[in-house]
Image (cartoon, rainbow, N blue to C red):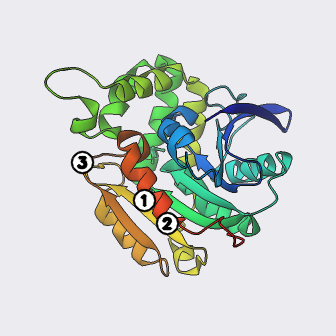
Amino acid sequence: MRVSETSVDIDGRQMVVQETGPVDGVPVLLVHGFPLNHAMWQNQIQGLDPPGNRFRVLCPDLMGCGSSGPIDGETSMQQIADQLAAMLEQLQVCRPVVFCGLSMRGYVGWQFLQHHRDKVSHLIACNTRAAADSQIVARGRRQIAISVLQTGTAPIAASLPEKLFALRTAVPGESAPGKSAEYRLIENTIARTDPDTIAKLQRAMADRPDATPMLNRVVVPTLVIAGECDVITPPDEMRTMAAQITGAKFACIAGVGHLTPLEDGPAFNALVTEFLAGVGSGEAG
Ligand code: MLT
């Protein structure tokens, strides 16, 4: 499937977006986690809907990440949601999107839903939570924001991937000991991310609001996807979150950690395809 790259102007800075599928397809917006880029969705950009051609898959590098321009000043979950809405307008995406956000971009998803409700048809919340940080976690994030500017990204690139992957997907079978290609991809992505981006996103996550009170007001069809071995957003916490959203479906992918779409692309794609069955084949979606 052909992947095209577009860039849009967000307040004078370029946001780069990877796109596949027909322009009149059901728009599916894939929003990457911290501090990654579109590459974590490589299994979905190519494989979400190869035969059906129903989906217009849009996969941005958020500001400060991948090939997009730097973050201007400080940022927040709401500002990132507003930038995504502006991107959709510039790409003339006229119909509501399937918003699929992982982890930190799940935090953005709650803001997107709150401030751009008319732009959302379905919500897929992957490996994320609605609650704000505890004081201890927020303090830890502010400390990381200080240290990454002093030491660069090497310490985070060395330590964070271990928490993102389950052992099974980090290290392939005995015949090929060592880190998996996906693990190396994530290590390299983190190492290449601007320390300024990491600092600003850590502060933005520390300051994010508690989205728990809005869960019982979510009215779009929702799928919550967890990873069985996820230590950052554990499946039990996600199951409890899903139970607060009327009609939400909950699924837990076996044997994977925090990066479900990358660690088990076929299982992830099957869940999304089943959730969106019928959407785009006649009705408005
Ligand atoms: C992410 O994957 O986006 C981060 O782990 C989220 C977080 O640090 O809370």
Residue 248 visible to an observer of this rendering: yes
The answer to whether mark 1 and mark 2 are in CB contact below 8 A is: yes
CA–CA distance in space, label 2 to label 3: 21 Å
CA–CA distance in space, label 3 to label 1: 15 Å
CA–CA distance in space, label 1 to label 2: 6 Å
Select label 3 or label 1 by which is in front: 1
- The amino acid beneath tag 3 is Gly
Badge 3 crowding class, 10 Å Cα cut-off, few under 14, some 14 to 19, many 20 or more, is some
Q: Position of residue 230 (x, y in %)?
A: 30, 49
Q: Quadrant of the C terminus?
A: bottom right
Q: Quadrant of the N terminus?
A: top right
- The amino acid beneath tag 2 is Phe
- Classify 218 as above or below 77: below
Please name the residue shown 51% across and 30% down the image: 146
Badge 2 crowding class, 10 Å Cα cut-off, few under 14, some 14 to 19, many 20 or more, is some
Which is nearer the eye, 45 or 157?
45
Residue 132 visible to an observer of this rendering: no
Which is nearer the eye, 126 or 26?
26
- Classify 285 as above or below 174: below
Residue 255 circle label: 3
The answer to whether mark 3 and mark 1 are in CB contact below 8 A is: no
- Classify 69 as above or below 215: above
Residue 271 circle label: 1
Instruction: Classify the position of ligand 1 by quadrant: top left, top right, bottom left or bottom right.
Output: top left
- The amino acid beneath tag 1 is Leu
Q: Which residue is mark 2?
A: 275
Question: Earlier along the polypeptide chain: callout 3 or callout 1?
Answer: 3
Q: Secondary structure at mark 2?
A: helix
Q: Position of residue 234 (x, y in %)?
A: 31, 56
Horizontal side of residue 55 vs 8, given as left or right: left
Does any atom of ligand 1 lie closer than 8 Å to the CB of label 1? no
Q: Position of residue 248 (x, y in %)?
A: 47, 74
